[in-house]
Image (cartoon, rainbow, N blue to C red):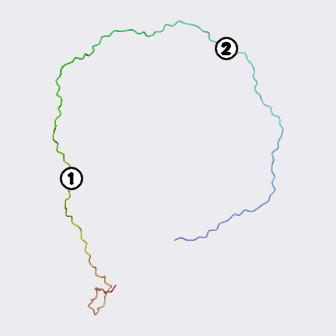
């Protein structure tokens, strides 16, 4: 079951305080610094260059050679042949087609009857009445609606 519980807690509120502070301000000072700077100097250097020489070298080069080859080639020979040619023949064909036709069919159908349901009993009796009502049975009052 939910309950309400009181819990103590502190709330911090800001307040205004005035204090004296000292701020260090930077200032410009001239100072001397020494550093090494690179210098360009010219030095004599000896360079060797290759000399142009010519040599004779033998190289194998492929050569085209014409070669004669004999081959057997198939030859066509005409031979008379008898061929049966199909002949056009008229034939009668019977075609079957579907036709819609009305047919009387008897189908059983559910029949509904209205039947009056008697009014429900109004109460159970545990005492005997004068109008033929027995103990443990019910009876109905027919009211005009």
Q: Is residue 54 left or right of residue 101?
A: right
Residue displayed at 67% across by 14% down: 47
Say if 72 sits above or below 91 in the image: above
Q: Residues within 10 Å of mark 2 (few under 14, many from 20)?
A: few
The outermost residue toward the right is 30
Lower sequence index among marks 2 and 1: 2
Q: Residues within 10 Å of mark 1 (few under 14, many from 20)?
A: few
Can you give x and y, in whole percent of width and height, for residue 100 in the image? 22, 54
Say if 85 sits above or below 96 in the image: above
Residue displayed at 21% across by 52% down: 99
In terms of image quadrants, where is residue 122?
Answer: bottom left
Say if 137 sits above or below 94 in the image: below
Residue that mark 2 sits on: 47
Instruction: Kindly report the distance in space between the C-alpha atoms of the residues bearing marks 2 and 1.
Output: 112 Å
Can you give x and y, in whole percent of width and height, for residue 6 in the image? 61, 70
Asked which secondary structure carries label 2, the reply is loop
The outermost residue toward the bottom is 130
In terms of image quadrants, where is residue 63?
Answer: top left
Q: How many marks?
A: 2
Quadrant for the C terminus, please. bottom left
Asked which secondary structure carries label 1, the reply is loop
In terms of image quadrants, where is residue 16?
Answer: bottom right
Q: Are marks 2 and 1 in contact (CB under 8 Å)?
A: no
Q: Is residue 86 left or right of residue 8?
A: left
Which label number is shown at residue 68?
A: none
Can you give x and y, in whole percent of width and height, for residue 33 in the image? 81, 34
Q: Is residue 10 left or right of residue 41?
A: left
Residue that mark 1 sits on: 99
Closer to the observer: label 2 or label 1? 1
């Amino acid at each position: 079951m939910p309950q309400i519980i009181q819990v103590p807690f502190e709330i911090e509120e800001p307040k205004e305080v005035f204090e004296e502070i000292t701020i260090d301000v930077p200032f410009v000072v001239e100072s001397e610094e020494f550093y090494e700077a690179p210098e360009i100097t010219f030095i004599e250097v000896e360079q060797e260059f290759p000399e142009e020489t010519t040599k004779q070298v033998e190289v194998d080069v492929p050569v085209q050679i014409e070669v004669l080859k004999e081959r057997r080639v198939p030859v066509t020979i005409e031979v008379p042949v008898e061929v049966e040619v199909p002949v056009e023949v008229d034939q009668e064909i019977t075609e079957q087609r579907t036709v819609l036709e009305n047919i009387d069919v008897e189908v059983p159908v559910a029949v509904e009857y209205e039947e009056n349901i008697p009014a429900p009993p109004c109460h159970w009796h545990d005492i005997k009445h004068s109008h033929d009502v027995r103990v443990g049975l019910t009876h109905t009052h027919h009211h005009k609606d």
